[in-house]
Image (cartoon, rainbow, N blue to C red):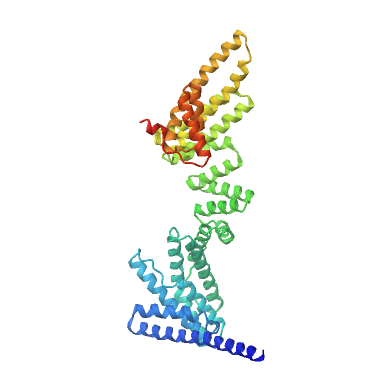
Amino acid sequence: MYRLILSMLVMLISVTSLVAQSGEDALKSAKKSFDSYKLNGDVEALKEASANLELAMQDSEVANDPKALLEAGDIYKEATVQYVTRRSLDAADKARGIDMPATKAAKAYMAAYNATDKKGTRKAAIKGLEDIQGSITNEGIYFIQDGTENESFYGNSYTAFQTNMMVSEFLEKNGGKSSLTEESVTQDKYYGGLAALLAKNYDGAQPLFEELMGAEYDDSAIYSGLFTIYTEKEMKTEAADVLQKGRTRYPDDSGLLFNEINFLLAEGRLDELTERLESAIAKEPDNISLYGTLAGVYQELYKKAKTDGDVEKEEMFYQKAEAEYQRGLEKDPSSARMISGLGSMIYNRAAGMTQELVELGNDFSKEGQKKYDELQEVVNVEFAKALPFFQKAEMSEPGDVNTLIALKEIYARMDEYEVSNEFKERIEKVQAGEKVAGSYFKEKGM
């Protein structure tokens, strides 16, 4: 047992030594390659230096050695310079040899300064920090630009801008000279907040945007950004307040207008929405979704008027909703949202009338029968009016159950039971998890 424990102890010591030696060797190789790069400008040598440095910094002893940290800062800084140079010459050249070299360089220099009291090392670290600041800004901007390709880059961008502000404070505290002016610090806060917002890091973005708003930074994105943050964090009072401030300061900003529309929708404040949506349509007349949203608002107002028994308003809002759907269809006759929205509205109105027919059907008086026949004719007209929209919807989405149900009911009311049964069978197939082979109306050559 004693021999086994001793053997394991010897193995542990050996492994520890191997790791430490591996870190030292990697650092030596990194220095050698970096010296070669400085001597003849060999970019491949710099790549080798960077790769070996990454390995060396995994060793805790190396990662805490002031001289090693200073060397790391120099290599990371040069890797950053090379990347920024390549990218400025060719925007399509986005290959990163090292992940976030500018940020790593800054952190290495600050760590080197804090790990020693030697003036030479500290002076070199301060010089390195002064040199790297502009590159950290570039790193942050590049990550934002590339965020559409990789969403994690937004988080990297936020880290870069936060690091740059940290470096600025570090330099001022320790006798260095930050290259960041008051204006550029403000810019870093703006881009840092924007990057955090895009990364959905709301806790990171909030204080930056709030500070900028307090300083009256001139950009509507501050207000729309804070509105998003407060909404996501369910801070309704703050969201409403910042939205009002933003709309007052930037009354013509489309982004804030759409934020207000979404806010009013969520709050159910329909009466206020129509004016906002009309304003949005005036700004973006080709935005089909706006017509659909306004039509939907009028539909809700129509339903409310119907529930309240206000016949005049009921008819007015119904006509307005129909007009908005038609406006949308004039812009895009193939819009699935406009087609299904208008068809469903007409169908639902007709279906509601059938309930009145049932009540009138129990009135066998002459007057009652007359009212029944008149309403029956109106119902038939409404269903026939809805039919073309559901036919178009079926051709677009043959397997949509709601469309199939509507078609089954409409054809049954038209006494075309063979067609109605065809849609009945299709409904049963879809509900059983099967796929509909194709569009019925396309097969009929419509």
| Quarter the C terminus occupies | top left
Q: Is residue 254 left or right of residue 352?
A: left
Q: Could you tell whether 234 is left or right of 141 in the image?
A: right
Q: Position of residue 239 (x, y in %)?
A: 60, 49
Residue reaching furthest to the top: 366
Q: Is 114 situated above or below 208?
A: below
- Depth check, front residue: 11 or 46: 11
Identify the residue shown where x is 50% and y is 52%.
Answer: 220
Residue 10 x %, y %: 59, 90
User: Where is residue 157 drawn, in percent x and y?
Assistant: 48, 64
**Which residue is pictured at 56% across the width and 76% down the height?**
173
Q: Nearer the viewer, residue 131 or 285?
A: 285
103 versus 421 height, above or below: below
Placement of 137 over or under 176, stated as above or below: above
Q: Residue 386 in the image: x percent, y percent?
A: 47, 27
Q: Can residue 139 be seen in the rendering of this structure?
A: yes
Please determine whether, in this image, residue 372 is positioned above or below residue 237.
above
The residue lying toward the viewer, choosing from 32 and 174, is 32
Q: Which residue sits furthest right?
A: 1
Q: Is residue 253 visible?
A: no
Q: Who is closer to the viewer here, 164 or 98?
A: 98
x 39%, y 68%: residue: 95
Which quadrant would the N terminus be assigned to in this image? bottom right
- Number of numbered labels in the structure image: 0
Give me the residue at 63% from left, 48% from top.
236
Q: Quadrant of residue 364?
A: top right
